[in-house]
Amino acid sequence: MGLPEPDETGTTFEANAELKALASARGANLPALADDSGLVVPALGGSPGIYSARWAGPTKDFAIAMARVERELTGQADRRAYFVAALTLAWPDGHCETFRGEVHGRLVWPPGGDRGFGYDPMFMADGHAITFGEMEPAEKHAISHRALAFRHLVQACFG
């Protein structure tokens, strides 16, 4: 629709999803859906968090981002991490409904697989022996943070 992307100035995934959804809903005068997502690493104080894409630099090279995560984890025994997706449905009048999904796991090095995107090759979900980068897309999508957020939306709107 040619709408400009708003600046992501929020301090949470939910705030950024709401900013994007509201900008689209108001700009198009239609309901709009937007998300914000990223990787949270407790041993790094929650980073990269809402800055997950920015860690990949201007070229969006996630090999750089993954190497940075690994470098900053040097000496840390805690490899826990989780992906977050905040999904917001907004209306032109400003009403918003936001849904959150999380998938927990741990980080592995070196990265494995070339499927998915972002940090997927270094993330192994709890209960699984392969990374998101190694999983078949249907298997990953069945357990992903985005899938969980969408299930919450569907349950709230149609359940």
Image (cartoon, rainbow, N blue to C red):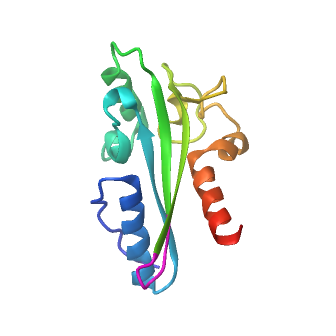
The residue closer to the viewer here, 128 or 2, is 128
Left or right of 145? Residue 86 is left
Residue 76 to residue 30: above or below: above
Expressed as whole percent of the image width and height from the top left, the position of residue 117 reads: 52, 42
Is most of the magenta stretch helix, strand or loop? loop
Residue 129 to residue 58: above or below: above
Q: Is residue 93 visible?
A: yes
Magenta-highlighted residues: 88-95
Residue 129 occupies which quadrant of the picture? top right
Expressed as whole percent of the image width and height from the top left, the position of residue 140 reads: 66, 41
Identify the residue at horizontal 30%, vertical 58% (top origin): 10
The residue closer to the viewer here, 75 or 111, is 75
Residue 64 occupies which quadrant of the picture? top left
Residue 12 to residue 88: above or below: above
The residue closer to the viewer here, 95 or 19, is 95
Residue 73 occupies which quadrant of the picture? top left
Whether residue 40 appears in magenta in the rendering, the answer is no
Expressed as whole percent of the image width and height from the top left, the position of residue 79 reads: 45, 22
